Amino acid sequence: MVDQGSRTEIMYPDLYKGLKLKPEDLTSYNSPLVGFNGNVVIPRGQIRLPVQVGSEVVGVDFIVADAYSPYTAILARPWLHAMGAVSSTLHLKVKYPSGGQVKELVGSQYMTRQCLVSTIKHQAKDEPSAPTDKGL
């Protein structure tokens, strides 16, 4: 996910495990994060990894967060600035200069909906059920 409002790149457990990263690969990161749902998350650490888009490769400092997310990672303003990119949430596109041309990444409306559904189901599962008035 690209979040032009965020100033921190985040990596979630599925990607961390998928890349076979180990705790010793991380450097310390001592600042807590506040998630979209308002919960405070203590990060596992930080890691710098190359992110390739087309032929462009940019080093990104990811904070590894042990929290639920339908996304594997969030790329934020530092990545957008390093790429010289502009994102449009309306058009689900990121445009960036490369080799004298303007190239673009195109998002998927279907995947966006699937992530939203996943988040709603996860939140509903975590919320305590309200007491019922049956039997009173």
Image: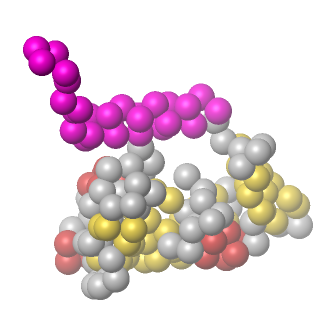
Give the residue furthest to the top.
Answer: 135
Q: Tell me which residue sits at (30%, 67%) in the image.
A: 41
- Predominant secondary structure, magenta span: helix
Q: Tell me which residue sits at (55%, 63%) in the image.
A: 75
Q: Please provide the residue range marked out in magenta.
A: 109-136
Q: Nearer the viewer, residue 105 or 112?
A: 112
State the image coordinates of residue 111 (x, y, percent, origin top left): 55, 34
State the image coordinates of residue 118 (x, y, percent, origin top left): 41, 34
Give the residue furthest to the right.
Answer: 100
Q: Is residue 123 above or below residue 94?
A: above
State the image coordinates of residue 86 (x, y, percent, origin top left): 77, 63
133 part of magenta stretch: yes
Give the residue furthest to the left.
Answer: 135
Q: Quadrant of the C terminus?
A: top left
Q: Tell me which residue sits at (50%, 59%) in the image.
A: 74
Q: Nearer the viewer, residue 7 or 134?
A: 134
Q: Tell me which residue sits at (41%, 39%) in the image.
A: 119
Q: Is residue 35 left or right of residue 105?
A: left
- Residue 17 occupies which quadrant of the picture? bottom left
Q: Is residue 100 above or below residue 26?
A: above
